[in-house]
Amino acid sequence: MNQFLQDIFAQPAELQRVLDDLAGPHRGQLQAAAALMKPARRIVVTSMGSAYFSAWPVAFMLGQVHPNVHLVETEQLLREAPFFDETLYIIPSRSGESGEIARFAKLIRQRGGRLLAITMTPGSTLATNADLVLHDISSFDGLICTKAYTTLVLTGLLAVSEMLGKLDQALVDNLSANFQWMERHKQPVLDHLAAMQALRDAAGVTFLSQGAGLALAGTAALWTEEAARVRASYNSFGNFHHGPVEQVDERFVGCWIDLSPDARSRELYAEIVSHRPALVTVSLPGVHAGAFEVPAAALPEAYRVIPAALVAQLLSYQVAVGRGCNPGEMRYLNWLVK
């Protein structure tokens, strides 16, 4: 089996393993992270590549309860960002050794800042310069971050839930139910997407969402560009309506990720589908006819990107296969770590 597909298919079990670890024997890590976040007057969440998009749901959830949360690419922070007192930096990273991440972690340490690392590599440069490490015990992917994306999201969100006093058995059970849905549906979703001629012929893919779902839309565009070597983009529902909607016709290939549906998203969806695009839709049950329905309505919005990621990953895989690529085989990125 192709490595990218193998990593996607291994994902539900790895997510459950991370949940069992952090909600069980290593819950103390989450409690320590919560204690670090609570007094921070300013929180900066940062990373690069797909880890940046895994940082996004964490920043989204924190921003709902904290008045001073910033999401910034690490490269931008290295170039120009000042250091303010009483700031906590949160950095998710699979390896903890990407160039920007390693340099910025050292810089935080040198300047006396506080750093919470979320990483799969507890001995990394990121981790050794952190005040606290949340260890994501998931196994490494191949070059494309699949398990790393969803398990880093899960790890960060569990810490925020712990801080809010909302990491209870109901949340754990709902997460497990969604991981079970992923396990049951991974092959049927792949089969459905494989039957879509438009994906095999796609010259580009546009991923659309709103709220926390934009974190998935962004990383899905990245997965598609990496795996299929084709242009992909992401946008919010509302911003897409302000101009880019002009490109929608029968040749348009898109993915509509509606994880926080409301009257406006339904209205814009109806407009898009009236132009007869090839559209893969991911949403909650009972929202859009013909959608891949993730059973995530009982989860806080930020967590919903995790089960929905299965569809976006398999879409990226299928576009790559349709273009004759070997998904996950890189020409230029073999040196890159995230």
Image: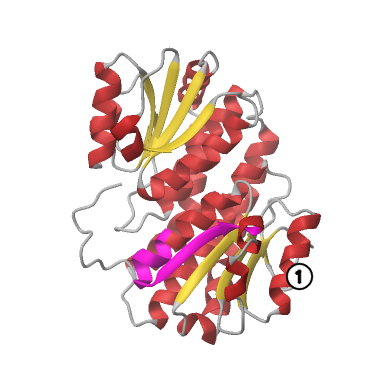
All told, the count of numbered labels is: 1
Compared with residue 42, is residue 147 higher up or lower down, i.e. above or below?
A: below
Model colouring = secondary structure
Q: Residue furthest front?
A: 243
Name the residue beneath numbered marker 1: 270
Compared with residue 156, is residue 199 higher up or lower down, i.e. above or below?
A: below
Residue at horizontal 29 percent and vertical 34 percent from the top:
79
User: Measured from the top left, where is residue 244 in percent x and y?
Assistant: 58, 67
User: Measured from the top left, where is residue 94 in percent x and y?
Assistant: 34, 43
Say if residue 12 shows up in the picture.
yes
User: Which image quarter: residue 112?
Assistant: top left
Q: Amino acid at mark 1?
A: Ala
Quadrant of the image for the N terminus? bottom left
In this rendering, position of residue 269 left or right of residue 180: right
Say if residue 19 shows up in the picture.
no
Residue at horizontal 58 percent and vertical 30 percent from the top:
62
In the depicted view, which residue is nearer to us: 158 or 79?
79
Q: Is residue 200 magenta?
A: no
Q: Is residue 236 magenta?
A: yes
User: Measured from the top left, where is residue 165 in percent x and y?
Assistant: 65, 23
Label 1, secondary structure: give it: helix
In this picture, which residue range is highlighted in magenta? 222-237
In the depicted view, which residue is nearer to us: 198 or 138?
198
Mark 1 packing: few (<14 Cα in 10 Å), some, or many (20+)?
few
Residue at horizontal 70 percent and vertical 37 percent from the top:
170
Residue at horizontal 24 percent and vertical 34 percent from the top:
102
In this rendering, position of residue 5 left or right of residue 153: left
User: Measured from the top left, where is residue 270 in percent x and y?
Assistant: 76, 70
